[in-house]
Image (spheres, coloured by chain):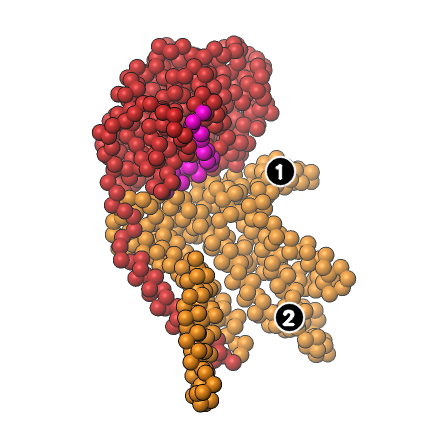
Amino acid sequence: MTSALGSAPAGSGITPRSGGGNPDQPVRPHRKRWGRTARWIGWLWVLPALIMYGFFVLRPLAMTVQYSLYRWNGIGPARWVGFENYLTVFTDRDLLKIITNAFVLIIFFSFIPVLLGLLVASLVRRITTGPGGTLVRTVLFLPQVIPLVAAGIAWSWMLSSSGLVNQAMRAVGLDALTRSWLGEFTTALPAVGVIGTWVMLGLCTILLVTGMSKIDPSLYEAARMDGAGPIREFFAVTLPSLRQEIGVCLTVTIIAALASFDIVYISTSGGPGIQTTVPGLEIYRLAFSQRQVGLASALGVVLMLLVVLCVLPIQRLTRGEKA
Amino acid sequence: MPEFPTTFIRRRLALLAPLLGVSLAITACSAPGSEQTPTGDSDTPVSTELGTDPITLEMYAETGFPLAKALADEFTKQHPNVTFNIREDQFTVITENAPRVLASDNAPDIIRLPTMVDLVKDGLLKNLDPYFDAYGWDKFPASSLVQLRLTEGGAERGSGSLYGMGLGYSVTGVFYNKKQAQQIGMTQPPATIAEFEELLAKAKATNLQPIMQFNKNTAGINFPHQALQNHFGDPTQIADWIFQKQGATFDTPAALKATQTIQKWAQAGYFPKDANAIDYTAMMGEFQKGNGLFMFNGDWESANLDKNMAGEVGFFLFPGETADAKRVAMSAPNTFGVGARGKNADAAVFFLNWAHTNEKAREIAVQIGGSHPGGPADLPLPAVNEGTVLAETLKASQQLGADNGAVDFTANATGGIFASAITPEMQKLIAGQQTPEGYVKAVQAEYEKELSR
């Protein structure tokens, strides 16, 4: 249906003009007209995609904003409540705690993977260019390929009270520290975070390794000639050159942290209490189990704004001075 | 170079802005939702004849509970002109989907129902009163259908028009591991709560897991909680609260005492230490592995336990404070309703009535569903093998019926109470993060919040 929508105006836009360009007409005006058309023809080419984008992204976005201003159960009549739902989002203690949880997850989904990624990338940089490079890259990237649901299930087994993590700890005499990592109030959120770290680390490392391979070797030579050691080298050459890659890593992982759903839903379902509930999970619960479509939409809009607020400064910081 | 991205973005925005504007304009014309009025179809004539025309009944049932499918197959065998198109989902998924599915153009004829209040408010369920008269369901024990009644517009449950029937009527209680019971010298089920607590202490002292109970995803410890609450006060108070009667509250001495007892049990280590990380499936697995003397659960597991732990499991209704106390337990129909927008209401109700009254259907309800088939009080119950859990749960169900002691689940009080209050607060309670007073108040606060919507 969409292709029909897309091709119809495109066809009707082009045919009459090309038909009008018959050989009897003077050349210059024809070219001029064609030039003007060419500018628009580009838009015609993207029109089908644009229509899809408008229908499946912008329209739902607009609808979400609209729903957020109503009290509605998804079926029956809706009642206009203005900004009341937003007031609830910013005053409800549980909802604030849930938003805070997402920010705690940023540490595990973004900061730790990027820092670890830098470390791992510096270490494996030389290996990845060698013969075993493909293998190393595959191993590092594997967590990205595994569906998050499968990762969540596997990790909830490993972190359970009789799981691999506790078995390993018992084997080395750390019996006193074993616990149900995902079931206890103090450890549940960090435990979920660790799963996120595992998933994100591969992505960050691969991006950073690729970035490092693009750095001009002469920069390192120059640094070494100036008497820089490996650490100085890292801070003076590697880190500044990776600015853009780090920016991409942070952007992607922060969005993953704030919009997390799969891992949390599978491993803890937001429990114990609301210790690991994140906005994505709460939006789903509010909309589909509690049938508060308005409040769920408001939380969704707030979440979107939070993502933009977190990601825009990073984009500016990492891209700004590049030119 | 720096010019390029900015102008590009600006241009892009210039194009997107009107698009967004147009979409906003399209959507903003009208408020979401429809002004549906509950369908007042209780006066339309109904038929109790199935006829011979081919009919396809659309059924929306619960995954993991084979009863509905088994009944459908048997029905088709007896009435070949009727076939079923069955869609299955997990119960939580049905709960989430029910309103939208029932409001859609191809709404199911028969649907496994979560809480019905919202659905009736939105006019999505067929009022079964005309069928009640036509089929003579007044011969059924009234108490078996009371949970399925709603007053006009779904304001209150427990009275008013009939909106569903049960495919099996479940009863809950305590399953126990016979071998372990013997080990701690339990020769017969406890007659009082005090006796039950003594057994828990003995099991703990013998290094057995006294109670195997799940508390992840949804609060399984709400089973023992309500079992206690049922006996610490007047059960009608609980029923009123569940039925959303005016002025009913969860903040009662009975609920508080039950919560305090649960806290005491948790502190004594009667529940698994990692109960908050054990979900329903894990609990069943552990219990069948022999980890756990007691398990609070319902008769829907009878057939399963008879198969996997044949002869090793017993069942009793949770006792009261005194040995002669009236028997009270959570018991609810496995509710099925008829979609108001479904196309074959007469045939759907014919099937529901058949499931209650046909001899073969009743046998299937017991053998496969593990539950009481309901139906007219004077119909005999299908025979079951002595010594099975099934025989014990069925007997318990009859005792409960005789004492008129069935209470619905507190988890069913409102659509969101289980997910948004009982589950998280119970998880906090057993981890020592919530006080009994705080628990009772938090559940009541969420209840009021939901009812005020």
Q: Which residue is mark 1?
A: A163
Which of the chains bears the disc numbered 1? A
Q: Is residue B382 left or right of residue B135?
A: right
Q: Is residue B76 above or below residue B341?
A: above
Disc 1 + disc 2, Cβ < 8 Å: no
B87 inside magenta stretch: yes
Which residue lies under the disc numbered 2? A238
Residue for point 37% across, 66% down: B19
Specify the segment rendered in magenta: B80-101
Percent x, y of residue A295: 34, 49
Name the element at disc 2. Answer: helix
Q: Visible in this render: residue B396?
A: no
**Percent position of residue B133, x then y:** 26, 21
- Who comes first in sequence, dot 1 or dot 2? 1
The crowd level at tag 1 (other Cα within 10 Å; few <14, some 14-19, many 20+) is some
Magenta span includes A239: no
Question: Which chain does orange denote in the image?
Answer: A
Q: Amino acid at mark 2?
A: Thr
Residue B422 image position (x, y, % from top left): 39, 35
Q: Residue at 50% of width from left, 54% of height from top? A: A257
Examine the rendered structure and indicate whether residue B89 appears above or below residue B284. Answer: below
Question: Rounded to the nearest whole Å, what is the CA distance between mark 1 and mark 2?
Answer: 40 Å
Would you place residue A236 above or below residue A48 in this image?
below
Percent position of residue B364, x then y: 47, 19
Residue furthest right as drawn: A131
Q: Disc 1 marks which amino acid?
A: Gly
Q: Nearer the viewer, residue B441 or A312?
A: A312
Q: Label 2 marks which chain's residue?
A: A
Chain that the image shows in red: B
